[in-house]
Amino acid sequence: RGYYQEWGKEAIEMNPGTVINIPANVKHWHGAATDSWFSHLAIEVAGEETGNEWLEAVSDEDYGKLA
């Protein structure tokens, strides 16, 4: 069980089998619930001049709001 959250939006709870499509250039985070673990499979479509940019970590305060 985990969460997915786009910048400025409410978090979405994910359970086994949940599928999330993340368009390019959408600032987001995803991870485990405090009482669970989380594993995911990411599929990236190759293209010219594409890449992945890791941003700041989710704060403990924001993460704690999900519990």
Image (cartoon, rainbow, N blue to C red):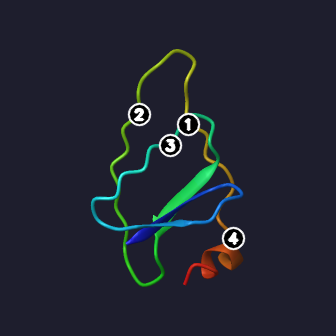
Q: Residue furthest top?
A: 48
Q: Is residue 29 left or right of residue 57?
A: left
Single out the mark in the foreground, 3 or 4.
3
Q: Which residue position holds label 3?
A: 22
| SS at circle 2 | loop
Residue count near mark 4 (Cα–Cα under 10 Å), binned few <14, some 14–19, many ≥20:
few
Kindly report the distance in space between the C-alpha atoms of the residues bearing marks 4 and 2.
26 Å
Read off the residue under disc 1: 52
Q: Could you say which disc has been placed on residue 59 in the image?
A: 4
Residue at the (64%, 80%) spot, across then down: 65
What's the residue type where badge 3 is placed?
Answer: Ile
Looking at the image, residue 20 sits to the left or right of residue 16; the answer is right
| Residue situated in front as seen by the camera: 42 or 12 | 12
- Graded by Cα atoms within 10 Å as few (under 14), some (14 to 19) or many (20 or more), the crowding at tag 2 reads few
Marks 1 and 4 sit apart, C-alpha to C-alpha, by: 21 Å
Q: Earlier in the sequence, mark 3 or mark 4?
A: 3
> Do tag 3 and tag 2 residues touch (Cβ < 8 Å)?
no
Q: Is residue 52 above or below residue 1?
A: above
Q: Looking at the figure, which quarter contains the N terminus?
A: bottom left
